Structures are given as structure tokens and as C-alpha cells.
Image: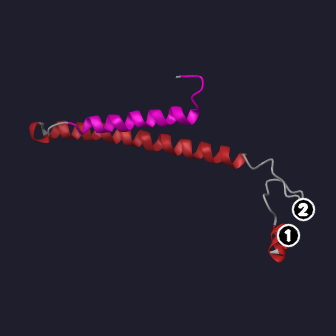
Amino acid sequence: MYEWESKELLILKEVRDKISAVWNHTELNVEEVSGECLRDELKKISDIVNDLVLQVDLEVERLIIRDCDLSKDYTCSHCEGDKIYVCDSCTDIWSKEA
């Protein structure tokens, strides 16, 4: 890990490694393995995919919260309300000017 790497980059690299691990479990000769071995491999794949889905869900939730906070400093110049890019009054005024 380098100090310049973002949290998103680290998580993306981890997700890529897990996807690669799933792929590694599919690289066996199906004709030469037993049903029990196939079931074990499918269980391993299932566990990795489940972990991936949970990890991606957590990251999506984190990014939604982070990205929603990006707008907290914006205020409408007309109504001075916070968390508003453009209020209805300004939108109405602008639509009449166009």
C-alpha cells in the first residue's frame, strides 16, 4: 500500500483479487473431479461472491453518504437555504428569463 492510494483504489484492488480467486476455482478439469470436489469448489465460489457482494454494498453505502455530504456547503443565493443547489423560486425566475 502506498500513501497516495485512495480508499476506493484499495477496495477496488481487493475486489479484483477476489474476482480473480473465483476464476481460479473454475480452472479445473470438470471431467476429472468428483461430484464432492465440484460441490466444494462451488461452495468456495459462493462464499467469495457473497463476500464480494457485501463488500461492494458497504462501499456503495459509504460513497453515497460521502457524496451526499459534498453538497452540504452549497446554499441557494435567493433563499439562503442549505443543502439546496437551486430552489423552486430561482428555477421559476430562471425559466421566465429564458
Q: Residue furthest front?
A: 98
Q: In which image quadrant can residue 87 be found?
A: bottom right
Q: Circle 1 sits in a helix, a strand or a loop, which is it?
A: helix
Towards the viewer: 59 or 35: 59
Vertical side of 98 occupied by 87: above or below: above
**Residue 71's spot in the image, x, y percent?**
75, 50
Earlier-in-chain disc, 1 versus 2: 2
**Residue 97's spot in the image, x, y percent?**
84, 74
Query: What residue sits right under mark 2 in the picture?
Result: 78
Query: What residue sits right under mark 1 in the picture?
Result: 89
Towards the viewer: 26 or 74: 74
Q: Circle 2 sits in a helix, a strand or a loop, which is it?
A: loop
The amino acid type found where label 2 is placed reads His
Per the picture, the main secondary structure of the magenta-coloured stretch is helix
What number of labels is visible? Answer: 2
Q: Residue at x 83, y 77 (%)?
A: 96
Q: Which residue is drawn at 42% across and 39% down?
A: 51
Q: Does 35 sit left or right of 5 as displayed?
A: left
Q: Residue at x 38, y 42 (%)?
A: 49
The answer to the question of whether label 1 and label 2 lie on touching residues, with beta carbons closer than 8 A, is: yes
Q: Residue furthest bottom?
A: 96
Q: What stretch is highlighted in magenta?
A: 2-27
Mark 1 and mark 2: Cα distance apart in space: 8 Å
Q: Which residue lies furthest to the left in this view?
A: 32
Q: Residue at x 84, y 54 (%)?
A: 75
Find out whether residue 18 is within the magenta segment: yes
